[in-house]
Amino acid sequence: IGAYDVSLDRSDEAAPMKGVDPVRLRVRHATSGKLLFDTLPNESPLIASVTDLTAHEARGMAKVTVRRRDVCRLAHFSSAQPASKGITFSGVLTCGTGKQEFTLRIAEHSSTSGNAVALSVALGSGPADQISLRAASTPEEQVFGGGQQFSRFNLKGQRLPIIASEQGVGRGKQPLTWLANLTNNGAGGSWHTSYAGVPHVLTSGLRSIFIDTHDYVTMNFADARVLQFDVNARALTSI
């Protein structure tokens, strides 16, 4: 696909359950061979979830809570349709109580002259309202960015919600944060509260990942093996 090679290969490991494809999705630069996107063996690059989202704001402090009611994580890829500078995969994710259809398009990004690849996901028939894009990582790979951050430089091992908010008084330091929360309706903040969060990271592995959306995003790097981006929407594009 333009400057990139895309492969969807059968994994050497056994399938996690009957009817689920043991596959691995990879995107490499065709000339250098650099691996830009990879999935963990036998794990889907996508998760779809049925969620309840609640948002609260007080004195400029924003807090969003997402509760998952059902998770669709077992993928079956049913078709692949090549097109000009792109390929579209279709398939189904198995949920606890049903199924969720999806399409995943991988294409050379039109405005970067072969220097970036775009992964676009859209949910079809099914109940999910959140998409999680999962890229394989290593414990050694460090992650930087997320917009204006005050407390941590390397975000690996952390879960970072992206929402504009007052930065807080105390930001976890005690007893200052406790006093601010008690007297000013939650104004203490957290380590991640920021005026300018951005769903974009750079890694020590020389990778850049940007989630091109205005929807609520949580960047979840708690599992050192995975870079996971949770988007509360039925479509997303990653560049």
Image (tube, helix red, strand yellow):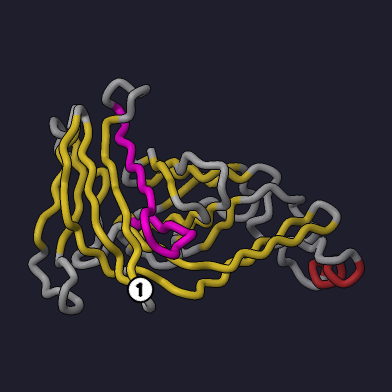
> In the rendered picture of this protein, how many numbered marks are placed on residues?
1
Q: Given the image, on which type of amino acid does mark 1 rest?
A: Gly
Is residue 124 within the magenta segment? yes
Determine the residue positioned at 15% across, 67% down: 22
Label 1 SS: loop
For the view shown, which residue lies furthest in the right direction? 183
Quadrant the C terminus occupies: top left
* Residue 141 placement: quadrant: bottom left
- Reading the image, the residue beneath label 1 is 98
Report the predominant secondary structure element of the magenta stretch.
strand
Measured from the top left, where is residue 96 in percent x and y? 37, 78
Determine the residue positioned at 15% across, 61% down: 23
Does residue 129 show up? yes
Measured from the top left, where is residue 53 in percent x and y? 61, 64
* Residue 75 placement: quadrant: bottom left
Measured from the top left, where is residue 67 in percent x and y? 56, 71
Determine the residue positioned at 55% across, 57% down: 160
Query: Magenta stretch?
Result: 115-134
